[in-house]
């Protein structure tokens, strides 16, 4: 049985198992970027897709886990040097490929431009129309800043909810974000009108990743992969997806092999 307790601002998951499945080794430090819903947010309730998945994986692999909720800009720097560090919902990009071990492939994450009255299929058109909001410290922000020109504006935010508010208020004309996150937050805000999304500009796969210094990374990856497969077979993963994305979007993901 898994139990949670708060300790010094951290959320600690203890797997109360015994015998051959008892938790072994040091606890994993699971780094969660604050405000990363619907993927993760490091809180006991509403932990997100990756948060709930990781809790279940910790239980099924008999691993004690300490969830550390920190600002996104600090997640990667803190996790990189931690021999017990694990990062939730990390996109596998060329820039990050050699900086982490990739423990579990979880979801595809298409990046789109969302707006209220126009569909943008490329960044240049969006920048010409007005300010574009994007999460600071991401490859998306770097991409926008590389191509902007003249007085074109890129508005960097530290929380995706800020970008959604900027779009709703008309202070930006578009928001560059993962499609699932944009639609999830818009729904949670009860915002109107419905979001319009252009064609995916790129797509990566969102993983649970680990520090290069992570001890026993290969064995942990194998255990997590097997546990994830069991969750797909017994319906646990499907239930988590539906609880955050709704039946239609979750079924669309699952129909694509996820």
Image (spheres, rainbow, N blue to C red):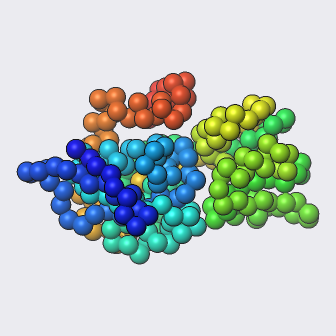
Question: Foreground: 247 or 69?
Answer: 69
Q: Residue at x 66, y 61 (%)?
A: 158
Question: Foreground: 175 or 91?
Answer: 175
Quadrant location, the C terminus: top left
Q: Residue at x 18, y 60 (%)?
A: 24
Q: Residue at x 63, y 37 (%)?
A: 188
For residue 234, above or below residue 205: above
Question: Foreground: 241 or 230?
Answer: 241
For residue 7, above or below residue 48: below
Rendered location of residue 41, percent (x, y)? 51, 52
Asked whether residue 71 is in view, the answer is yes
Rendered location of residue 159, percent (x, y)? 65, 56
Snapshot quadrant of residue 144: bottom right
For this view, does 21 lie left or right of residue 212?
left
Snapshot quadrant of residue 66: bottom left
Asked whether residue 225 is in view, the answer is no
For this view, does 153 lie left or right of residue 139?
right
Q: Residue at x 77, y 32 (%)?
A: 192
Rendered location of residue 145, percent (x, y)? 76, 64
For residue 53, above or below residue 28: above
For this view, does 134 lie left or right of residue 149?
left
Quadrant location, the N terminus: top left
Furthest residue in direction right, as rendered: 151
């Amino acid at each position: 049985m898994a139990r949670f307790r708060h300790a010094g601002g951290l959320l600690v998951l203890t797997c109360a198992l015994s015998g051959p499945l008892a938790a072994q080794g040091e606890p994993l430090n699971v780094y969660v970027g604050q405000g990363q819903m619907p993927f993760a947010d490091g809180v006991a309730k509403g932990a997100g897709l990756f948060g709930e998945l990781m809790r279940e994986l910790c239980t099924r692999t008999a691993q004690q886990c300490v969830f550390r909720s920190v600002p996104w800009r600090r997640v990667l720097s803190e996790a990189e040097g931690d021999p017990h560090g694990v990062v939730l919902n990390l996109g596998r990009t060329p820039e990050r490929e050699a900086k982490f071990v990739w423990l579990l492939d979880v979801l595809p994450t298409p990046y789109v431009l969302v707006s209220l009255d126009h569909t943008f299929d490329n960044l240049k058109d969006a920048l010409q129309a007005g300010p574009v909001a994007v999460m600071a410290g991401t490859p998306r922000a770097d991409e926008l800043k590389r191509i902007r020109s003249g007085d074109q504006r890129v508005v960097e935010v530290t929380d995706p909810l800020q970008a959604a508010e900027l779009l709703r208020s008309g202070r930006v004309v578009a928001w560059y974000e993962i499609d699932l996150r944009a639609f999830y937050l818009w729904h949670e805000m009860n915002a109107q009108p419905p979001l319009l999304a252009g064609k995916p500009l790129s797509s990566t796969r969102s993983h649970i990743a680990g520090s290069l210094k992570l001890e026993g990374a290969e064995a942990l990856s194998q255990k997590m992969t097997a546990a994830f497969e069991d969750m797909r077979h017994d319906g646990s993963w499907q239930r988590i997806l539906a609880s955050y994305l709704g039946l239609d979007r979750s079924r669309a993901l699952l129909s694509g092999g996820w």
